[in-house]
Image (cartoon, grey):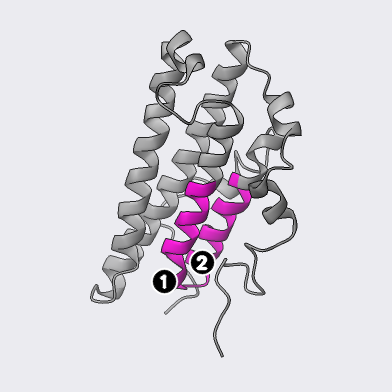
Amino acid sequence: RSNGFPRTDHRPMASESSMDAYHPPLMVPLLRAVSVLQNAARTNRTAHFQPSTAYIISSVRGLLMDLGCLSRDAPILKKYSLLAKERKQILSDLATLVSQSKRASKDEIGEGQRDLEVEEMIRGSGQLFAHVRGFLALAVQCGISIQAASQSQSSERGSLDTQGRWDSDEGTLVRAVG
């Protein structure tokens, strides 16, 4: 078995395209989280898919919290209905990614099916990243300062990331036992 999943298309993966371009500092935790999931897929560590997905969820939750958009009843979302719609899409992307990571990490599926599930999981994480980036662009258009929000990264989430608590020697979020 190859060390990862087969590529059947010639489109760049999220890490090869949009995630290497400039992104607001507020997106750094999400970039790291998506990279951890991609590394778990590349190194075929199926036990790391769901914890990596949890890291992505935590990153998105922190980003929404920093912008004051975590609650669906947030005043900023009531003021900008399009922003609320985009937030809903992000949450839908997250739910899809959670389901996909569960399917990709099942023990009882065959190698070929797992490769398809992993590829779809990675595609979904890239889609989520793109939607979050679009959400931030829309937030800027609505007059929300994402720079001010990103300066508040001394939150618990931010300090955990900078201390490397979410990292491992393998770069896959979960430390290998033994």
Number of other residues with Cα within 10 Å of mark 1, as a class: few under 14, some 14 to 19, many 20 or more:
many
Q: Nearer the viewer, residue 166 or 21?
A: 166
Q: CA distance from mark 2 to mark 1?
A: 7 Å
Q: Where is residue 50 shown, x and y percent of the image?
A: 41, 62
Q: Determine whether label 2 and label 1 are within 8 Å by CB.
A: yes
Q: Where is residue 59 shown, x and y percent of the image?
A: 56, 45
Q: Earlier in the sequence, mark 2 or mark 1?
A: 2
Q: Which residues are magenta?
A: 30-58
Q: Which mark is residue 46?
A: 1
Residue 16 visible in image: no
The kind of residue tagged 2 is: Ala
In the picture, the quarter occupied by the C terminus is: bottom right
Q: Is residue 157 above or below residue 85?
A: below
* Left or right, residue 97 beside residue 23: left
* Left or right, residue 32 beside residue 13: right
Residue at image x 76%, y 32%? 151
Count of marks placed on residues: 2
Residue 51 visible in image: yes
Residue at image x 49%, y 60%? 52
* Left or right, residue 67 beside residue 84: right
The kind of residue tagged 1 is: Thr
Q: Which mark is residue 40?
A: 2
Residue at image x 71%, y 32%? 150
Q: Image quarter for residue 162? A: bottom right
SS assignment at label 2: helix
Magenta span: helix, strand or loop, mainly? helix
Residue at image x 29%, y 70%? 106
Does the magenta portion include 22? no
